Amino acid sequence: MADPSSYRPRPGEIPDSPGVYRFRDEHRRVIYVGKAKSLRQRLANYFQDLAHLHPRTRTMVTTAASVEWTVVSTEVEALQLEYSWIKEYDPRFNVKYRDDKSYPYLAVTMNEEFPRVQVMRGHKKKGVRYFGPYGHAWAIRDTVDLLLRVFPVRTCSAGVFKNAARTGRPCLLGYIGKCSAPCVGRITPEDHWDLADEFCDFMAGRSGTYLRRLERQMAEAAEDMEYERAARLRDDIGALKKAMEKSAVVLADATDADLIAVAEDELEAAVQIFHVRGGRVRGQRGWVTDKVEEITTGALVEHALQQLYGEESGDAVPKEVLVPALPDPVEPVQQWLTGRRGSGVSLRIPQRGDKKALMETVQRNAQQALVLHKTKRASDLTTRSRALEEIAEALDLDSAPLRIECYDISHLQGDDVVASMVVFEDGLARKSEYRRFQIKGFEGQDDVRSMHEVITRRFRRYLAEKEKTGEWADGEELTDGGRHPGGEAVVAGPSAPDDGEALTHGPALKDDDGRPKRFAYPPQLVVVDGGQPQVAAAQRALDELGIDDIAVCGLAKRLEEVWLPREDDPVVLPRTSEGLYLLQRVRDEAHRFAITYQRAKRAKRFRAGPLDDVPGLGETRKQALIKHFGSVKRLRAATIDQICEVPGIGRKTAETVAAALAGATPAGPAVNTATGEIMDDEDGAPETTTDAPGEPVSAGTPDERRGQER
């Protein structure tokens, strides 16, 4: 940390004139750029007692190792140079614009012989007319599709255009009347250029004159009894009006203006801009700004103006810019905007009427953008750290629980009982570590006993991994199914070990970063979905395994109470607590993951048929049998020789199928619920069949499927 007095310029060295200054760190990187009407007065503010400086300013001057400046003639030049240097150096202590994505524009290449209408992003090119920006590219395409009926301007790429000119055949748009087909000479270059110019005039807001002209032509065609032409003009007018309806009139005097609103708190600010052309909102954009320096609303507006118009010129800078607060001083900024446009620009705060009402709308959008950004940042490092610290304090843990595992039991009236395990590391879900279990130790509904079984199985694997890594010097060898090093426990299949967790073999026990894999990595906190009974069962399972360094708690849904083992009263966290919010997220994620698996198992069981139990019979041959015989009932009545006639079915397989179906209980007869009549196969009775090819047998997201048991 540098002492500002070590690089403070000597008295009299700093000129008393406008200019731009740069602070550099010890590596000569520019960390801050600023401008001033008087460099001497401005820089003197940075070299006062550190206790009197704003915390962010104090951090900047103690990070810097030198300061330099450039003198300019006017404040307008200082504004321009400041913008250029911020773009060039991207200083860490200047205002940062995030989410400043490349917004799409509707562009008309008036610099080409045959102008083209297209969607463009990025830097603007000379000779191209731009309209927007738009929030989404599809909004541009919808508008263009409507307007091409009236203004059939070229939209194809250079390659398509040259190919059509070479073959003498236009593209599809040329055949359906949405392109004037200049590629094959249906229109002269001059007429096509005029058509593109009319398109630009309409997009620029000069639509009333063109509509009135079309309506006059429609009336004249009707008087001359040219009804087909009149109908075509009528449809053109309808298409134009529909395109105009996509952007409602907000300012009745056909104003061209940009409205800028700012919503801010101590650390961040959201900037929203509405682009109004011809009295209609033609585009919208916005940023979220880190207030990494002490800055006023007027200064934020100034930075937004630099961001908006720093590379614009001409009509891209509107005649009027409405803002919530004026920069101080405002005259240089206004002169700079006037220079960018080439004519006068009004920079002011709306006081009344439609413009003030529209500014309030923009302000609401800025507030919503800031709230949305704050919501998205709920998982940022600061918030997560605070949540983990609150949990550690409430549960009296030695340290913050960096890995939390949560378990939930799911079933339907005691059938298809399953459990889920979700993992949160550093407060974030780690879906690749999710696991799911089938409860196999008993039949029926018993959430407490199920929880005990799942915790036992999971941590038995943890102990086995500890043994294999050599962490035990005198550990007793465990026999829990012979897990292979690097394996991961997922849901049991028919060939799974006795503890219900299938094996996936891997080459090593540790990842590349050296961290133990899967169940070898223990949590600092186990959360169970439930109250005292479930918590007691989980703690009893850990005690039986001799594990005493993992904390356990439960979160009960009814009152969101946190229960601890061997405690008669719950821990009640404040409703606004970040720690409680994190526990709720973990619990809800475990519930969602468990119920998704339970529903998938139930659906698969309902779709199961008698052929599913035939050993060695795959899906392809099952479908071949059903297709050949038409139903399981006919297959059951077939002889072994008849089954052998099916392609791919040998005699041994046919004997196995016949034996399996002979031992299976046939399905009951189908009944027509309308008449009460019992139907056989010939009457269209439904038969139980195997799953259709390609039918999904499991649900959930890709992350869930990666974690499901195999």
Image: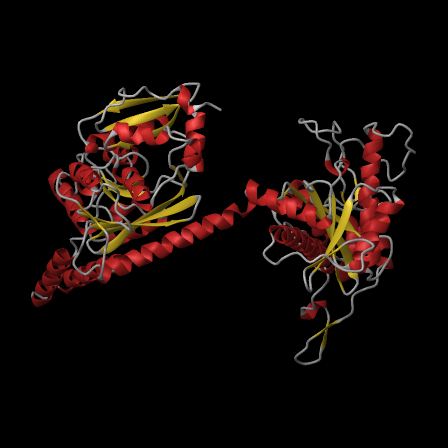
Q: Percent from the top left, x then y, of residue 512?
A: 67, 26
Q: Quadrant of the C terminus?
A: top right
Number of dots carrying numbers:
0
- The image shows residue 583, relative to residue 501, as above or below, that is below
Q: Describe residue 150's horizontal placement relative to residue 85 as left or right.
A: left
On the image, the x and y values in percent for residue 215 come to 13, 62
How far from the left and from the top, in percent, is residue 375?
A: 50, 50
Q: Residue at x 84, y 61 (%)?
A: 444
Colour mode?
secondary structure
Q: Is residue 114 visible?
A: no
Task: State the residue in front, 313 or 225.
Answer: 313
Would you say 422 lies left or right of 446 here? left
Q: Is residue 550 left or right of residue 513?
A: right
Residue shown at the point (45%, 23%) measured from the top left = 3
In front of the other: 34 or 44? 44
Q: Quadrant of residue 287?
A: top left
Residue at position x 33%, y 25% in the image:
22
Residue 413 picture quarter? bottom right
Q: Quadrant of residue 648?
A: top right
Q: Picture coordinates of residue 392 (x, y %)?
A: 69, 45
Q: Residue furthest toward the bottom?
A: 675
Relative to the observer, which residue lies in front, 306 or 640?
306
When the figure is inspected, residue 338 is found, relative to residue 143, above or below; the finding is above
Residue 56, relative to residue 394: is it above or below? above
For the residue pair 489 and 524, the one nearer the viewer reads as 524
Q: Is residue 694 visible?
A: yes
